[in-house]
Every structure is written in C-alpha cells, then in structure tokens.
Amino acid sequence: MEPFSENFNSDRNFTSRGNFTISWLNDTILAELKKAAENRLNNLIAGYTYIVLTVFGCSGAVLCLLAIFTLNFRGRQNILTSVRPIFVSFCISSLIYSIVCAFQAYSCLVGLPNFLALPAYDPLCQIIAFGYYMIFFVDVLQHVTLALHRFFAIVVANRFVWVRTRACTAVLVAMPWVFVIIYMGLPFFHVGVDFGYNFTLDRCYIIKVHSWAYAQFRKVFIAIAFVCIAICYSSIAIKVGVTRRRAIGAVEMSTKRTDALSAVNNHSHSAEPTQKPTHKPTAQDNRGAGVTKTVIALCLLFVVTFLPWVIYPLVAKTDIALNTPPGLTVVTLFLLACPSSPWLIVLLTPALRNHIQRQFNRIGF
C-alpha cells in the first residue's frame, strides 16, 4: 500500500502544480490582452485627436498665409511689416505639423498592418517621426525669436542699428530651422535615439533610446526658452514703463511752463484761452497696437501650452502620470500649441482680420 500511496501523492502534487501553472498562464494572457486593449483604445483616441489637429492646423495655416501674401504691404512701415517673416514661419511650421499629424492619424486608426510598419517604408516613417519632433522644437524657438525681435526693436534698436535691418530678421527666422534640423538630424546617425515605427503606439515615433539625456533635453530646452522669453518681455515692459513716465513728466513740465507764460501774458480779457494739444491715435498706431496684442497672445499661448508639459511630470515625478486625466489634458494642450499660432495671428491682427473679412464678403460669405 505504501508504493501506491506515494504514487497517489506524487500525482496529486503534479496535478496541483500543473493547475497553478495553467492559472498563472491564464492570468498572464489576460493581463496582456487587457494591456493590448488599453493601448489600442489610447491609440484610437490619439488618432482622432490627430485628425482634429490636422484640420485645425492646416486650415489656420493656409488662411493665415493667404492673408499675409495677398495683403498689400506697400507703404505699411510698421510693426506688422517687420514681424511678417516671423508670422510666415509660424504658419509654415503649423502646416508641416498638420501634414505629419495626418500620417500619425492614419497609423493610429488603422493599426496593424499598415504600410508605414513595413521595412520598405522605414525611411518615410523615420522622416515622419523626425518632422513630428522637429516642429515642436522649431515652434519653441519661434516664440524665442519673436521675443528677441521685439526686444531688439524696442530696447536696443537705438544702440545697434543692425538689429532693425532685414538681415537681422532673416537670421532670427532661419535660426530655429537650422539649429533644430541639425539637432534632430542626429538620430538618423543613431545618436541619442532611433526613429521608426513604434508597434506599441502604432505610429512613427522613437523606437530606441541610446541616451536619456538626449531624450530629456527637450524639457530643459523649453525651460531655457521660457527664461529667455521672460527676460525679453520683462525688459520690454521696463523700457516701455520708463519711456511713458518720462513722456508724462515732459508733458507735465511743458504744461506748467505754458500755464506760467499764459499767466504772465494774460493782461487782457480779450485774449483767447490757450488749448492744450491733444494727440489722436493714427491708423498706424492702431495697427501697431493690434500686432502688439497678437505678440502678447502668442507669448501667453507658449506659457499655457508648453510650461505645463514640462512642470507636470516633474511634480508627478514620472512620465507615466501623463496617462492620467490631468496628464492627458497637459498633453492635449501641448499638441494644440503649434496649430493654434496661425489662428491667433490671423484673428488678433486687425489688418489681417479685416483683409480676410473683405475677401469673404467679396465671394459672398
């Protein structure tokens, strides 16, 4: 009976171990299936988001470019003329971003299989991932360029004449594109990260990280850009405040002198009362004020969309927190930064807005 009992116990232990193994495999498979379903749902949400970004960004960029290039700038020597190349750069970056988002929407919605996941189209997928990341850096530097342009024009223009020239504006416009193309071109040589088709995210993205310092540099980059923008606009605010106080003081001194002279010369009751000259705002002043509002709105757009994307993961101490509802809100704001710029430019700049309204009225809208 002993051999029989030993065999019975060994069979029972084997059966229990087998049941445990099967149960563990089932739990693992279920967990993987659940994770795959969650990833697929997130990718579908991302795909529909990219569609909205494509339509929103492309329509705004085309509308803004049409307004800028069909508006007659002859005789308009004002702030709009000087910032026109920077506004065009914003529109071009938004248009490129919209085209890239169209490819990202396709791959996220279709899933596997799709042509971007094939090895034959890997170069195209790398270019799409390159464009996706490049535009974010370009957009950040364009905000810095706009701040520097206004800083040069208002604070240091009287000391350095060159900063008011077209050559300076051309350098400021080209700087973001040249720098970012060089920096983001390094992954094509397997430096920092590798671009390709990310099968988890179902889109052209980063597939391998060689250096986390390179991957995280974009957040430090945005923080440095914010510091530069804050310094530029703070200097502009101080300069404008000092200039206004001096102007008010000069007007008060002139008024006191005029009143004193009038009191001395006022020996006859028939003398006509003196009238203080008043300055009425001209059309050029109104156009300048309108463009200034656009510049301020673009600055606020940068603060609202880019800064939370940098600060929130630092507070949460992990990038995984971006999968939470507050984190997804931060990411959505970040994605809206680039396509929103042309809309702000064309809607808040009076000359461009009025020109678009005239064109729509002409065709019957």
Image (cartoon, rainbow, N blue to C red):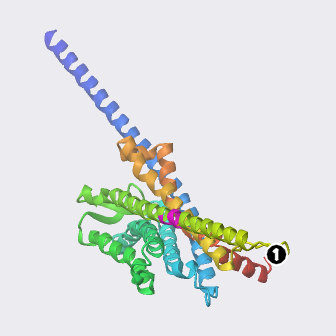
**Residue at the spot 45% in from the left edge and 57% down from the top edge:** 306
Vertical arrangement, residue 212 with respect to residue 341, above or below: above
Q: Nearer the viewer, residue 180 or 196?
A: 180
The magenta segment is: 239-243
Whether the magenta-drawn stretch holds residue 339 is answered as no
Mark 1 Cα within 10 Å, few/some/many (few <14, many 20+)?
few
Left or right, 43 with reference to 291: left
Badge 1 amino acid = Glu
Vertical arrangement, residue 195 with respect to residue 82, above or below: above
**Residue at the spot 57% in from the left edge and 72% down from the top edge:** 58
Name the quadrant of the N terminus: top left
Q: Main secondary structure of the magenta part?
A: helix
* Quadrant of the image occupied by residue 294: bottom right
* Quadrant of the image occupied by residue 171: bottom left
* Quadrant of the image occupied by residue 364: bottom right
Left or right, 256 with reference to 93: right
**Residue at the spot 57% in from the left edge and 74% down from the top edge:** 61
Left or right, 28 with reference to 153: left
Left or right, 282 with reference to 18: right
Name the quadrant of the C terminus: bottom right
Position in image of residue 117 (x %, y %):
39, 66
